[in-house]
C-alpha cells in the first residue's frame, strides 16, 4: 500500500465526522448534514426538491408534462418496480462520485446512503429481504480494486440493517465499457452479460434492493432486474446515488 493510500485511509476515518466539507474542503459544523458546508448543500441537486417526478424512476420531470413517467420510462419496459435516487447527476454529484470511483474515497458512499435514506419512501417499500449490488466484471474490479456499487450497497445495508449478497448476480466481461457506448449499444452490450449465480437456489419470493452508483440510460439496472425477476424475485427496488437528467 503506498503512502497516499494510507493518507486516504486516515481521511476516511476523519471525513464522516464532519470536519470539512466533502466538496470544497471548508471547515464545517459537526451537525452539518452529509458533511457539506451550507453553500455546497444549497447547490446539491437533491431529487426530493422536485415536485413532479417520474412514478417509476423518480427522475424530475417538467410540471407541464401530461405524463406521470419520464420519457425513458415511457419508452422502455422497466423490470424494476421503483427507483430511488438521492441526487440529480449535476456538477457536485459528478465530482463526488468521480472521487468515489477513481480516487478510492469510499467514505463518500456513507453520505450517499444517508441521502437515499432521507428520501420520502413509502413505508410499504421497506419490507425487504436482501440487498444486491449491480455487479462489475472481474477484469474491471481487478483494475480498480473494488466495485463502487458494492461499497454503496454495504453502506445501505448497514443503515437499513439488511443482509447483502454481493455475488447473487455475476457480470460477464463483454470487452466493451458501458460508459463509452450510446444508448442503443449499451442495451445490446448488456443483454446476456448478467447472470444469476446458481450457487444460490433462487430469488423466489424475495423483495430485493438493487444498488448502483449512477443511473443513466438504465440498461444495466434493467437487465439486472430482469434476471432477478426471472429467478423469482417478487419485487425489485433500485437505489442509486445519482440519476442523470434527460437532455
Ligand atoms: Zn462546501
Ligand atoms: Zn422514469
Image: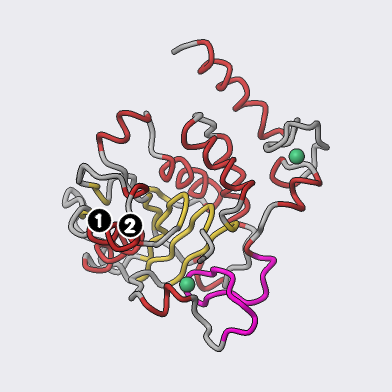
Residue drawn at (56%, 49%), measured in percent from left and top? Answer: 113
Residue drawn at (80%, 46%), measured in percent from left and top? Answer: 39
In what quadrant does ligand 1 lie? top right
The residue that mark 1 highlights is 190
Discs 2, 1 touching: Cβ within 8 Å = yes
Considering depth in this image, is 167 or 217 the residue closer to the camera?
A: 217
The x, y position of residue 190, in whole percent, is 25, 56
21 displayed left or right of 153: right
Q: Quadrant of residue 196?
A: bottom left
Residue drawn at (60%, 53%), measured in percent from left and top? Answer: 90
Considering depth in this image, is 9 or 87 the residue closer to the camera?
A: 87
The boundaries of the magenta stretch are 48-65
Q: Tell me the element at label 1.
A: helix
Callout 1: few (<14), some (14-19), or many (20+) C-alpha neighbours within 10 Å? many
Q: Does 50 appear in magenta?
A: yes
Residue drawn at (18%, 57%), measured in percent from left and top? Answer: 192
The residue that mark 2 highlights is 220
The x, y position of residue 182, in whole percent, is 34, 57
What is the quadrant of the N terminus in the image? Answer: top left
Colour scheme in the image?
secondary structure
The x, y position of residue 184, in whole percent, is 29, 63
Among numbered discs 2 and 1, the one appearing first in the sequence: 1
Callout 2: few (<14), some (14-19), or many (20+) C-alpha neighbours within 10 Å? many
Q: Does 8 appear in magenta?
A: no
Q: Please, is residue 41 above or below residue 234 in the view?
A: above
Considering depth in this image, is 5 or 215 the residue closer to the camera?
A: 215
Amino acid at each position: 500500500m503506498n503512502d497516499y493510500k494510507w493518507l486516504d485511509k486516515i481521511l476516511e476515518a476523519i471525513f464522516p465526522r464532519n470536519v470539512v466539507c466533502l466538496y470544497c474542503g471548508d471547515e464545517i459544523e459537526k451537525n452539518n448534514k452529509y458533511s457539506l458546508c451550507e453553500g455546497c448543500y444549497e447547490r446539491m441537486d437533491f431529487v426530493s426538491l422536485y415536485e413532479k417526478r417520474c412514478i417509476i424512476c423518480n427522475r424530475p420531470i417538467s410540471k407541464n408534462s401530461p405524463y406521470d413517467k419520464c420519457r425513458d420510462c415511457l419508452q422502455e419496459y422497466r423490470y424494476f418496480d421503483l427507483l430511488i435516487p438521492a441526487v440529480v447527476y449535476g456538477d457536485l454529484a459528478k465530482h463526488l462520485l468521480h472521487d468515489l470511483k477513481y480516487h478510492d474515497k469510499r467514505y463518500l458512499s456513507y453520505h450517499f446512503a444517508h441521502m437515499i435514506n432521507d428520501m420520502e419512501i413509502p413505508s410499504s417499500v421497506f419490507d425487504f429481504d436482501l440487498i444486491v449490488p449491480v455487479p462489475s466484471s472481474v477484469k474491471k474490479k481487478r483494475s480498480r480494486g473494488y466495485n463502487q456499487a458494492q461499497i454503496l450497497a454495504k453502506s445501505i445495508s448497514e443503515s437499513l440493517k439488511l443482509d447483502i449478497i454481493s455475488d447473487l448476480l455475476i457480470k460477464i466481461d463483454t470487452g466493451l465499457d458501458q460508459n463509452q457506448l450510446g444508448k442503443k449499444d449499451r442495451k445490446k452490450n448488456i443483454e446476456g452479460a448478467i447472470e444469476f449465480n446458481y450457487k444460490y437456489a433462487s430469488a423466489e419470493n424475495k423483495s430485493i434492493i438493487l444498488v448502483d452508483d449512477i443511473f443513466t440510460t438504465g440498461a444495466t439496472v434493467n437487465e439486472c432486474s430482469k434476471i432477478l425477476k426471472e429467478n423469482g424475485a417478487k419485487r425489485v427496488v433500485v437505489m442509486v446515488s445519482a440519476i442523470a437528467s434527460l437532455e
